[in-house]
Image (cartoon, rainbow, N blue to C red):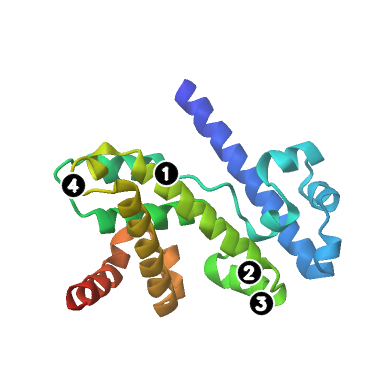
Amino acid sequence: MQTVESGLRQRQRLETLRGLHLAASELAEEGGLAAATVDAIADRAEVSRRTFFNYFASKEDAILGLVPPRVPDEVLESSFEDSTDTDDLRRAVHLLVATARASRMTEGGYARRRELVDRFPEFNHRLKRQAQEIQELVLDQLTEQDSLLSGRVEGPLDRARALVLMAASIMRFAYESDPRILEEENLSAFDHSISVFRSLLKEA
């Protein structure tokens, strides 16, 4: 019974989140950013102003569909469940990609988000800031995992930071090659980009 209730609450939460995002993006398209006030968004979504701030930190986040970064539990567990897996670079890429996906729920995916950014270039700054927040979150997760850091090399924090920066570069490389890759469910879609970077590192 508790599982059913929990599932219902989650569906209701997602519906409210989606409703606020759609209301915000529609208002911005209809009348520009000035028209997409928090009050107007809440009114169109038929929720209170207080409810709005339970879901989004700002109207810009609501328009873009950006939610606070989080590492999905299932990805975090699967990334560290095998203590014999020493492929830290692939692990870092998968954590970063999964966190980015969980933090952006733009209706219509990449194409829709690209349209919004093209119309409102000031959103680029917010997207870059969120990307930094995502990297910092993944860095925190990596440094907390003894399986990643124990006894392998000196300077584990520097190593984790280097992994996250490299993973971010791989993610950007894959994205620029095919912007739709972030919409792919299968994380193995990034394996080719990881291989390209490995080859370059061996040649260096």
- Dot placed on the residue nearer the N-terminal end, 4 or 2: 2
Q: Amino acid at mark 2?
A: Asn
Residue 18 in the image: x percent, y percent? 64, 51
Q: Is residue 177 left or right of residue 61?
A: left
Relative to 19, is 73 on the left or the right? left
Q: Horizontal and vertical percent for residue 149?
A: 25, 43
What residue is disc 2 on?
124
Q: Label 4 sits on what residue type?
A: Arg
Residue 98 shows in the view? yes
Q: Residue farthest to the top?
A: 1
Q: Residue at x 74, y 38 (%)?
A: 51
Residue occupying the far left of the picture: 84
Q: Residues within 10 Å of mark 1 (few under 14, many from 20)?
A: some
Residue 118: which disc? Answer: 3
Residue nearest the viewer, comparing 146 with 34: 146
Helix, strand or loop status at disc 2: helix
Mark 4 or mark 1, whichever is nearer to me: 4
Is residue 107 visible in the rendered image? The answer is no
Q: Which residue is mark 4?
A: 152
